[in-house]
Image (tube, rainbow, N blue to C red):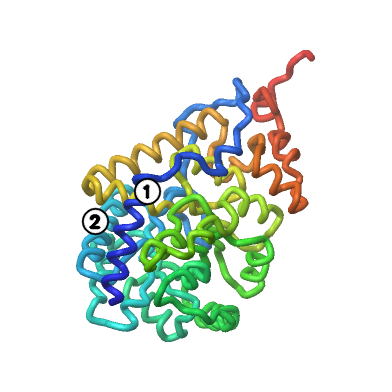
Amino acid sequence: MISDRKDDHVRHAVNHQRHAVGANDFDSVTFVHHALAGIDADEVSLGVEVAGKHWATPLYVNAMTGGSIDTGEINRKLAIAARETGIPIASGSMSAYFRDPAIAGTYRVLRQENPHGVVLANVNANATVDQARSAVDLLEADALQIHLNAVQEVVMPEGDRSFGAWPAQIERIVAASAVPVIVKEVGFGLSRQTVTWLREAGVTVADVGGRGGTNFARIENDRRVGGDFAFIESWGQSTANCLLDCTGVTGIDIAASGGIRSPLDMARALALGAKATGVAGVFLETLVSHDTQTLIDKIETWLAQLRTILTVLGARTPADLVDTDLLVTGDVATFCRLRGIDAAALAHRSPGGANRKHREGVTTHE
């Protein structure tokens, strides 16, 4: 039954990706173009620091699948793509492995095909400490993801209906974990209050996992007889809104996933404060519709294009994007107003505005 559900999730996710509406809230975030801000491309490095570890890029393959023969093969191909492009990769939820250790190979393949890469194990918030340790051990994982998916669970016909124990269980796992812990939403967003709580619980990274990408409420509703939960498909905050909501929250790294459609969305998310950006649906659809090499080519193209964007913006590293000027408009600006966020300040962040004298020490006559 669990294997069937995993296959259902992939099928519905790919189908939704193929018919996805193009717009999301990242379109309400625009870089102010300063025509003399550019630098030389060879000055740009894509390296970032996440959870105290150096990642070669701010892009990672986010949690997708595992638990059946078909999804094991998908994981194998994803791992090859991650290995060949040097980007981190997360497993899908390993709950199926806890119920049936015989399917361990459908997850273990992520490490077998990518022996020297950054690999993240993934469990739900009901996992025991021993299960979390087992997941990390199986993948020799560099970090542990705990996914939060209450909305998905209530729509899922066979899903959980009890979530009150999650906070205490997260604290137990964090206290016992030998690797950094990342807590992520699965498409409904993390609020400022939630991220602050996660920081106090000792979580190292919060992946805001906002609305705009794979919609698990819609996927689970498609699996329901009668599809009677359509009203909840727009639940939650977008990734752009989540990042803005977390402005000023320190002591925890912020990652962004959910609706990252392009290198420009990656740059927008990084400029809004994310240390790294996770992609799942776009990469899954590319792999299933084409092949591993096509996915490798896409990832390499995205990284090259991200480098180009940083070059034009004058950002030597992804972290430097937080000093670029942004215009926030539309529904995102409304969200900021209602949540007490000064969106206008984002338009005046760069020290030099339209010229480079602040970087090069050039003296000009005004």
State left or right for residue 311 relative to residue 95: right
The one of 33 and 40 positioned closer to us in this rendering: 33
Q: Secondary structure at mark 1?
A: helix
Q: Give whichever of discs 2 and 1 has the lower sequence position.
A: 1
Please name the amino acid that badge 1 sits on: Gln
Residue at 47% of width from left, 69% of height from top? 155
Please, is residue 99 above or below residue 4 in the view?
A: below
| Residue at 50% across, 77% down | 125
Q: Quadrant of the C terminus?
A: top right
Asked whether 51 or 132 is in front, the reply is 132
Q: Position of residue 159 (x, y in %)?
A: 43, 76
- Left or right: 268 as drawn, with respect to 328: left
Q: Is residue 236 above or below residue 2?
A: above
Q: Residue furthest front?
A: 226
Instruction: Give the x, y percent position of residue 277.
Output: 48, 51
Q: Quadrant of residue 299?
A: top left
Q: Secondary structure at mark 2?
A: helix
Q: Image point 70% across, 28% down: which residue?
A: 352
User: Tag 2: Cα neighbours inside 10 Å, few (<14), some, or many (≥20)?
Assistant: many
Res 146 label: none
Residue 285 visible: yes
The image quadrant that residue 333 belongs to is: top right
The residue type indicated by label 2 comes to Lys
* Residue appearing at x 47%, y 56% in the figure: 54
Disc number for residue 77: 2
Q: Could you tell me residue 287's position as x and y percent?
A: 27, 49
From the image, tell me which residue sits under label 1. 17
